[in-house]
């Protein structure tokens, strides 16, 4: 009996210290997932891997982690894992290993077991958009939590304002933020515009928010677009 109790304890403890992130590629083309830990957090899966159309890969991440996931598109890697990506590039390499994705790129962001044991997650378009992303808890987290889908299921590239479009080979492959386009304090929420009272949504944010109300689009968009859950796994679906 004692052995059974011990095994049960170890099983529950194992579940409590790790989360499954199920990353699914619903795009009609191959993507290369990028992963980056926040600050001093570790980098799961060496920071990146290929995900063919229709495939799902589960990444196990311990509690206490915080970071981001994104899709890279149009990559061309050699046998050593070196080469450029059309969008989301992280230094011309398959394994990002601590490098972030070059904007514009759609980010799925999370902090596990943060304040009061809550997970905080969002899909951010602050750095622009490249592919649709939906970020969903696999189970409810109880009263007081916004355990619902964050993100953007619409392709924002075709309708992207002309001055924000990123073109490649005659196709619009990404949509820049207004900050990236103008580098102004007003659009980037910095300097005199760097407070909640003075920072206002930029033109790109207005476009993104109209198409994807559940996505984070400017520096102080927390209340509307940051979600909380607890003790659950997550699905991240691209396209």
Image (cartoon, rainbow, N blue to C red):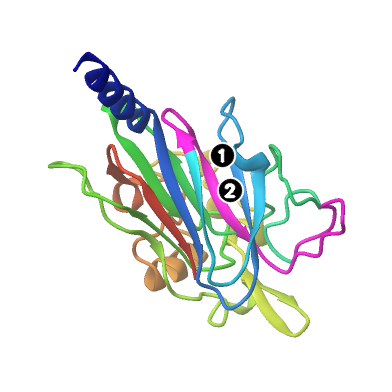
Return the disc, 2 or 1, that comes first in the chain's sequence: 2
Percent position of residue 205, x then y: 46, 62
100 on left or right of 11: right
The percent coordinates of residue 128 (x first, y second) are 57, 61
Q: Does the magenta portion include 75?
A: yes
Residue lying at 66% horizontally and 74% vertically, measured from the top left: 173
Could you say whether the residue bearing mark 1 is in a helix, strand or loop? helix
Q: Position of residue 118 (x, y in %)?
A: 29, 33
Q: Are marks 2 and 1 in contact (CB under 8 Å)?
A: yes
Q: Is residue 221 visible?
A: no
* Local SS, label 2: helix
Q: Quadrant of residue 110?
A: top left
**Secondary structure predominantly adopted by residues drawn in magenta:** loop
Q: Is residue 46 magenta?
A: no
The span shown in magenta is: 61-85
Decide if residue 92 is on the left or right side of residue 51. right
Between the residue at mark 2 and the residue at mark 1, the CA separation in whole angstroms equals 6 Å
**Residue sitting farthest toward the left:** 143
Please name the residue shown 29% across and 43% down the image: 228
Residue 38 drawn above or below residue 197? above
Q: Which mark is residue 8?
A: none
* In the image: residue 126, left or right of residue 201: right
Disc 1 target residue: 191
Image quadrant in which the N terminus is located: top left
Disc number for residue 185: 2
């Amino acid at each position: 009996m004692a052995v059974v109790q011990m095994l049960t304890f170890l099983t529950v403890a194992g579940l409590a210290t790790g989360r499954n992130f199920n990353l699914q590629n619903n795009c009609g083309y191959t993507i290369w997932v990028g992963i980056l830990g926040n600050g001093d957090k570790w980098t799961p899966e060496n920071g990146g891997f290929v995900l063919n159309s229709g495939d799902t890969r589960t990444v196990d991440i311990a509690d206490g982690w915080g970071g981001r996931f994104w899709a890279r598109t149009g990559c061309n890697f050699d046998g050593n894992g070196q080469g450029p990506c059309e969008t989301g590039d992280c230094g011309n390499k398959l394994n990002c290993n601590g490098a972030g994705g070059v904007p514009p790129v759609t980010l799925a962001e999370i902090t596990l077991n943060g304040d009061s044991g809550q997970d905080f997650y969002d899909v951010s378009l602050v750095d622009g958009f490249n592919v649709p992303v939906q970020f969903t808890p696999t189970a409810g987290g109880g009263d007081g939590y916004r355990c619902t889908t964050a993100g953007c299921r619409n392709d924002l590239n075709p309708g992207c304002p002309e001055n924000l479009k990123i073109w490649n080979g005659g196709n619009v492959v990404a949509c820049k933020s207004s900050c990236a386009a103008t580098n102004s304090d007003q659009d980037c929420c910095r300097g005199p515009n760097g407070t909640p009272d003075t920072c206002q949504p930029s033109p790109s944010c207005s476009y993104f928010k109209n198409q994807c109300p559940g996505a984070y689009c400017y520096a102080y968009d927390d209340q509307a677009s940051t979600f909380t859950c607890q003790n659950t796994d997550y699905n991240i679906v691209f396209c």
